[in-house]
Amino acid sequence: MVKPLVIVSKGADPYSTTKMALKRFPLPDLKNKRILIKPNAARLASPGDGITTHPTVVSATIDYLREKGAKDIVIGEGCIFGVDAREAFRMTGMKEISEKKDVKLIDLDRLGPAEWTIPHGKLLKKVKVSSILKDFDWVVSIPVMKTHMHTRVTLSIKNMKGLLWRREKAKLHHLRSNERITRGYKELDFGIAEMATVLMPDFAVIDGTVGMEGMGPAYGKPKEMGIVLVSDSPLSADAVASRLMGFAPEEIPYLRLSAERGLGEIQLQNISVEPQDYLKWEDPFEPPPTKFSIPFPDVVVYDKGSCSACLSTLLLFLQKYHQQLDDYRLIDKKVHIGIGKYLDFCPDGTVLVGNCTSKIKKKGIFIKGCPPISSEIMRTLDSRKQRGSII
Ligand code: SF4
């Protein structure tokens, strides 16, 4: 059996490092193909922060695909809820690249949805995706090499979650199941593997020029690696990238579940990696914390089953508004905040963030949204204060 091929290249310049990797990969005939490039540009972050894909990696990919005959290339992304896509595209450098290269840049959430059935889906039977996806013949996922506080790593397969339509992106965090189906796996990991059965990219270009370690995907530390991986077997590319980050691929639950579904190979001995001595570039990433910690000693967070969208919102909210929360301190002089779908206990007066906490909303100040945006949290708190309804 032919082993999947993954090319790794390393260098100081993201453009030439990406091109070097692509040149060594035998690409299929791309003439007359309509190509979607899906970077990670879903957050307000600048190139080199390790949060979003470096635009130079996207630029090198566009140039190389054109050299190989591709004519119809589009960059598309659907941002996380509450992020203004125009602003994200400007900050991440995608707008500039699209203009320079004369490539269309699409906010996928502005188009209508299409519903796709997941064959043999156990937790996820259907997903709504951006309707334009059916128009593409070849999808290139260009993620950043990052740790993730809920899934350990986020790479080319998880990057495809941005193709889910609007609030559908949060759907994977709402999945509930019983042990008989999930066999001890988290519903989120299970959902990503089921999503991958219909949203597997055709090609992966993993941007490991500057990745993120620790509290990824947005609050960790940038990690300079200077590497780029490419493959037409995205699951294998993710496995090799995980290994270079210091994680055994089999220990990443959604990679293992995807491999179980026959979506690709994650056993390194069954993957052909070039150069063969690629492990000389391994540089272990600080793993994501198993317990989320808030860098504000006067804030107590009750988190049971939240997703990264709510956690990111919460961190953003505290960074911006922490000084304005005195009216919401409880008897211990601390601000208490609850998040997550399994939250069933918190003291009276807790600020309950996100729709997941609605079932205990009588316990405190409920802020609706999935996730709510940070300014809305403050607005809701202020309006409760004006109405004199703080507990
Ligand atoms: S409310 Fe928050 S924790 Fe719940 S699914 Fe939405 S974003 Fe995730």
Image (cartoon, rainbow, N blue to C red):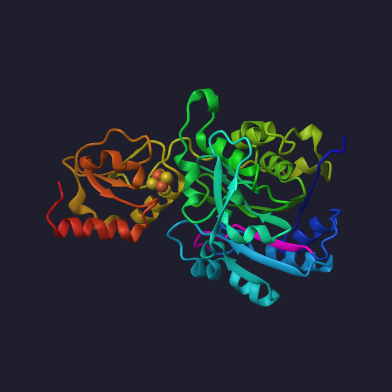
- Magenta residues, as a range? 33-45
* Quarter of the view holding residue 20: bottom right
Q: Quadrant of the N terminus?
A: top right
- Between 386 and 50, the residue placed more toward the observer is 386
**Magenta-drawn stretch contains 77:** no
Instruction: Please give the name of the residue rendered at 68% of the width and 43% of the height, measured from the top-left corner.
Output: 238
Left-right relation of 69 to 153: right
Taking the image as shown, residue 229 lies to the left or right of residue 219, namely: right
Q: Position of residue 369 (x, y in %)?
A: 36, 52
What is the x, y in percent for residue 59? 70, 67
- Can you say whether 279 is above or below 128 in the image? above
Q: Is residue 213 above or below residue 123?
A: below
Q: Is residue 248 visible?
A: no
Instruction: Point out residue 332 in the picture as x, y percentages from the top left corner.
Output: 19, 40
59 vs 297: above or below: below
Residue depicted at 70% across the width and 56% down the height: 139
Q: Quadrant of residue 197?
A: top right
Q: Nearer the viewer, residue 210 or 380?
A: 380
Measured as percent of width and height from the top left, residue 47 is found at 59, 64
Pick out the residue farthest to the left: 388
Total labels drawn: 0
Residue 135 appears in the picture as rendered: yes
Q: Residue at x 35, y 55 (%)?
A: 317
